[in-house]
Image (cartoon, rainbow, N blue to C red):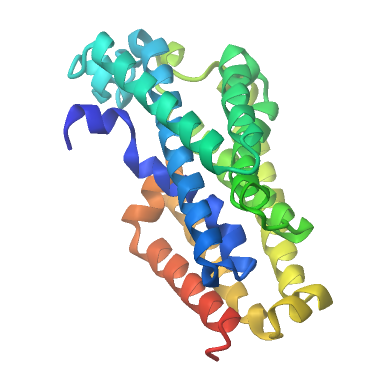
Amino acid sequence: MPPLLRLLRPHQWLKNGFVFVGVLFGHAWRDPALLGAALLAGAAFCLLSSAVYVANDYVDRNQDRRHPEKKRRPLASGAVSVPAALALGFVCLAGGLALAFLTSRAPWIFVAYLLLQVVYNLGAKHIVVLDVFIIAAGFMLRILAGTVGVGIPPTNWLLLCSLMLTLFLGFAKRRAELDALVDDSAVHRRVLEHYSRTMLDQFIVIAATGTVVSYALYTVSPETVALHGTPWLIATVPFVLYGLLRYLYLLHRQGGGGDPAREVLTDPHLLAALAGWTALVVALLSSWL
């Protein structure tokens, strides 16, 4: 794709799908106003996250030139000039904030996301464990933007399941980065010096177990059955379990796991698990089954 578009990392917009979790489990797809508000919140997050990617690439461009993969990024490779990149980043930032303040009931969520990115890049990304929790917090804010921000009350189950899943993906990403270390470790994240493969494997197991258990308990809880009018959401658990196990296979045997969005978009098994889970959830919540 064109370098300017690549600079925005559009494949990473898949992460902003967390904005629509509340729409799905809150039955809000039947309300055009709520659905439209969630779509605008998702668009705002796409613009803001792309602005953050541009800023990160600008700051890290010299270091990225020494990395075997990141040297191909538009700024590091010289495919996009610094003035053009900064102008594009500013347009995305202004557009995202404009959407947030004009359409959301809680624009502070989007401001909090930007402040979180500033804290992360000013030094929190070098603090072991906290770095992954901050990444997970960014996903929590996406969920809040699609619930509180559009008038849908979030449930504790929803937040807990999402927290465990994003911690799993975050620690798996660090594990993949650790496996990709080369002799010149200066081109990699400094925080990796504080992680070990054994430690990360333990963290991953804890987060994966928490994801499956919390989601399974959510599907059979009396509140869930009463809210959705079906006791059969438990049937969606195998899709979640298969997706997690497949991700672990890609991480440990295929050299994957470093980019969750790319893995989901390119691995047919993960795509099938996600599509099957989504289709079954929609069918159950719509009383089609």
Q: Quadrant of the N terminus?
A: top left
x, y (%) of residue 65?
A: 29, 13
For residue 238, what is the image quadrant?
bottom right
Determine the residue positioned at 34% across, 12% down.
61
x, y (%) of residue 256?
A: 41, 45
Q: Is residue 54 above or below residue 35?
A: above
Q: Quadrant of the C terminus?
A: bottom right
The foreground one among 192 and 231 is 231
Residue 256 appears anywhere in the view: no
Determine the residue positioned at 47% across, 31% down.
98
Q: Is residue 127 above or below residue 220?
A: above
x, y (%) of residue 32?
A: 49, 65
Determine the residue positioned at 29% across, 27% down.
7
Residue 171 appears anywhere in the view: yes
Q: Is residue 232 left or right of residue 21?
A: right
Determine the residue positioned at 71% across, 74% down.
219
Q: Is residue 20 above or below residue 72?
A: below
Q: Is residue 266 above or below residue 11?
A: below
Furthest-bottom residue in this view: 289
x, y (%) of residue 183?
A: 40, 17
Count of number-bearing discs: 0
The foreground one among 161 and 127 is 161
